[in-house]
Image (tube, rainbow, N blue to C red):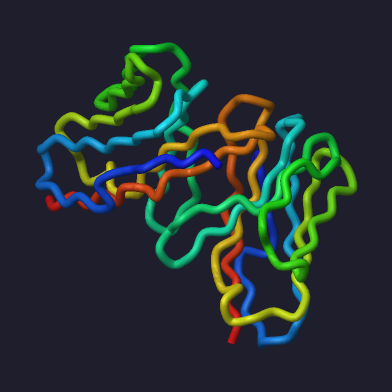
Amino acid sequence: GQQVMQIPQYQHVQEGEDFTTYCNSSTTLSNIQWYKQRPGGHPVFLIQLVKSGEVKKQKRLTFQFGEAKKNSSLHITATQTTDVGTYFCAVPTNAGKSTFGDGTTLTVKP
Amino acid sequence: DTAVSQTPKYLVTQMGNDKSIKCEQNLGHDTMYWYKQDSKKFLKIMFSYNNKELIINETVPNRFSPKSPDKAHLNLHINSLELGDSAVYFCASSQRGRGLFFGEGSRLTVL
């Protein structure tokens, strides 16, 4: 079935530093979604990318979809303590289900 | 108003017992899901229902039985609970091809 590799598994940054998480697939994706899960919380949908080479921004978050539609990244500029949590990518597989990456857990030191 | 609500939020029970988790969504979505999140935070899909019909049934023990009385509800019943069933179970809903909206989760602890 569809697999997606997400790296790194953990990232510890100082407040104000940047952060990036990457998702890679061996096959071409129709779209990719990104979610954030705060500690003790539930995953919250952030965005869906559909077009090749697409770049979308949400305040300090920048989402990119690769030209070949096989990889994607989420970049956070100047992290804040409110950014802590686990970030997941999710890709569609057959029968309409979403397969989640293993997540990148971000901790921010004030 | 909560978009996807699931109850109970916490379950603590003994091995061998049976338990149910209920889920309701008021978003008008046509697809509902059950996901299991283990202690390492990996999110694995268990079931998916589209308009009350089962469309995805991943490799989960048949002790797990979902039921969808209507397209706004998806319940999960678990028989003969085992230690390895301890996890957080998330209900989610979506409109086909769009993002998932998750409930707050039900943390199941089997002793």
Looking at the image, which residue sits at the far right?
Answer: B69
x, y percentage for residue B83?
58, 81
Q: Is residue A67 visible?
A: yes
Quarter the N terminus of chain A occupies = top right
x, y percentage for residue B69?
89, 48
Q: Is residue A59 left or right of residue B50?
A: left
x, y percentage for residue A40?
43, 59
Q: Residue at x 60, y 70 (%)?
A: B10
Q: Residue at x 61, y 73 (%)?
A: B85
Q: Residue at x 68, y 54 (%)?
A: B6
x, y percentage for residue A50?
47, 16
Q: Is residue B1 visible?
A: no
Q: Residue A49 occupies which quadrant of the picture? A: top left
Q: Residue at x 62, y 25 (%)?
A: B97
Q: Nearer the viewer, residue B101 or A67?
A: A67
Q: Is residue B23 left or right of residue B10?
A: right
For residue A92, above or below residue A40? above
How many marks are shown on the rendered structure? Answer: 0
Q: Is residue A38 left or right of residue B49?
A: left
